[in-house]
């Protein structure tokens, strides 16, 4: 399965990639919203892992834009973020942006992230 | 720090620095997960503990600045203490300190923000574990909740001398010490400060408390009498 990882922190992206690749996933890492669109054109993702705090771009705005393309409207998105979950409005994220899971990075081990990815991809 | 105010320049700076500090701890914690060796487990536990304190401080600043809204909900304090002990278990094991939970008799639920209260208790717990590990006796750190006239008193107790002085040091960090002290603030005062700062968000404070023969720091959390009727 293709996993698009939108993560500005390269070190974390490498670690997440190493955790997901042994599970049989191809992980395409980009650090920016623009890169995400380019990669999605080339390799349609089955799942997106997004840190919405992106350099030069708001990840939520990106997601609204991403969802405007019909072929990308149903791709599940995991928010994997430094933002406290209490600052995120779950119903809006779910209803309007197709966010299926919100994981607060400091509380999320690699195994929990990997389990979440597995559960969503095989759902 | 004034509740209800937005972040001052200094608070905004602290928040920025703290969030910057979170990043390397997070990287170390996650990298260490990929390795099997026992030493890496140690590295992960250390990184997780400092990640927690930095995160908690950032949370207190964000909550004071109303960036993070409060989510009030009914909380069973005894269950929260068991969760806190679970969160602290790897850290305590690393330092060879035993944790004991004494939730006492059934207490009335309280209304508070669970994340903030839990973060405060974990920050406080780390301080007690460190202090206990540096003391000569092997007494456990007790997480306790008991009823009082004013509500549920939840806190940490140990044989290490953590009490009024730690609290004064912590308050000094906030510029709110009642008495001037000469020593430089260091060590566990930061964790007490973070816990106290978080508790202020939910309108309570740390105070020195006695539990059997132990001294500790606790917060009094007003019970919800309406919930008790439900």
Image: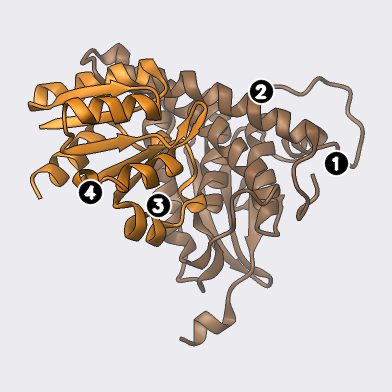
Chain colours: A orange, B brown
Question: Residue A42, how many percent across, how many down?
Answer: 18, 25
Question: Residue A40, how many percent across, how many down?
Answer: 23, 31
Q: Chain of mark 4?
A: A
Q: Residues under labels 1 and 3: Cα distance?
A: 31 Å
Asked which quadrant contains residue A41, the reply is top left
Whether tag 4 and tag 2 are in contact, CB under 8 A, the answer is no
Relative to B129, B222 lies left or right? right
Q: Quadrant of the N terminus of chain A?
A: top left
Among numbered discs 2 and 3, the one appearing first in the sequence: 3
Which of the two marks, 4 or 2, is nearer to us in this view? 4
- Look at the image and tell me whether residue B41 can be seen: no
The residue labelled by disc 4 is A70
Relative to A38, B61 lies left or right? right
- Do the dots labelled 1 and 3 sit on one chain? yes
The residue labelled by disc 3 is B82
Q: Is residue B98 above or below residue A74?
A: above
- In the image shown, does B120 or A110 lie closer to the viewer? A110
- Do the dots labelled 2 and 1 sit on one chain? yes
- In the image shown, does B19 or B74 lie closer to the viewer? B19
Q: Residues under labels 4 and 3: Cα distance?
A: 47 Å
Among numbered discs 1 and 3, the one appearing first in the sequence: 3
Residue at 18%, 34% in the rendered image: A45
Q: SS of the residue at dot 3?
A: helix
Q: Is residue B117 above or below residue A7?
A: below
Residue at 47%, 52% in the rendered image: A88
Which of the two marks, 4 or 3, is nearer to us in this view? 4
Q: SS of the residue at dot 4?
A: helix
């Amino acid at each position: 399965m293709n996993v698009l990882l939108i993560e500005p922190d390269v070190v974390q992206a490498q670690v997440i990639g190493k955790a997901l690749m042994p599970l049989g996933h191809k992980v395409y890492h980009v650090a920016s919203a623009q890169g995400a669109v380019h990669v999605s054109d080339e390799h349609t993702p089955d799942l997106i892992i997004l840190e919405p705090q992106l350099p030069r771009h708001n990840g939520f705005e990106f997601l609204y834009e991403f969802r405007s393309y019909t072929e990308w409207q149903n791709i599940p998105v995991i928010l994997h973020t430094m933002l406290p979950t209490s600052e995120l409005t779950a119903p809006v994220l779910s209803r309007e942006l197709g966010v299926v899971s919100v994981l607060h990075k400091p509380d999320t081990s690699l195994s929990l992230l990997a389990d979440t990815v597995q559960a969503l991809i095989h759902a | 720090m004034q509740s209800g105010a937005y972040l001052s320049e200094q608070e905004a700076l602290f928040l920025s620095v703290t969030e910057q500090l979170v990043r390397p701890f997070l990287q170390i914690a996650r990298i260490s997960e990929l390795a099997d060796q026992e030493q890496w487990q140690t590295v992960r536990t250390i990184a997780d503990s400092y990640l927690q304190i930095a995160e908690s401080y950032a949370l207190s600043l964000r909550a004071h600045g109303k960036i993070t809204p409060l989510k009030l909900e009914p909380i069973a304090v005894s269950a929260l203490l068991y969760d806190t002990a679970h969160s602290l278990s790897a850290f305590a094991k690393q330092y060879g300190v035993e944790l004991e939970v004494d939730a006492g008799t059934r207490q009335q639920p309280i209304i508070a923000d669970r994340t903030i209260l839990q973060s405060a208790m974990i920050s406080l717990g780390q301080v007690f574990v460190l202090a206990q590990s540096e003391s000569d006796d092997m007494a456990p750190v007790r997480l306790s909740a008991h009823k009082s006239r004013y509500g549920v008193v939840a806190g940490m107790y140990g044989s290490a001398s953590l009490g009024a002085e730690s609290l004064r040091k912590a308050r000094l960090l906030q510029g709110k010490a009642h008495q001037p002290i000469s020593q430089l603030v260091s060590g566990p005062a930061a964790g007490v400060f973070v816990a106290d700062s978080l508790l202020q968000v939910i309108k309570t404070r740390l105070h020195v408390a006695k539990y059997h023969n132990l001294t500790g720091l606790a917060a009094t959390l007003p019970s919800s009498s309406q919930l008790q009727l439900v």
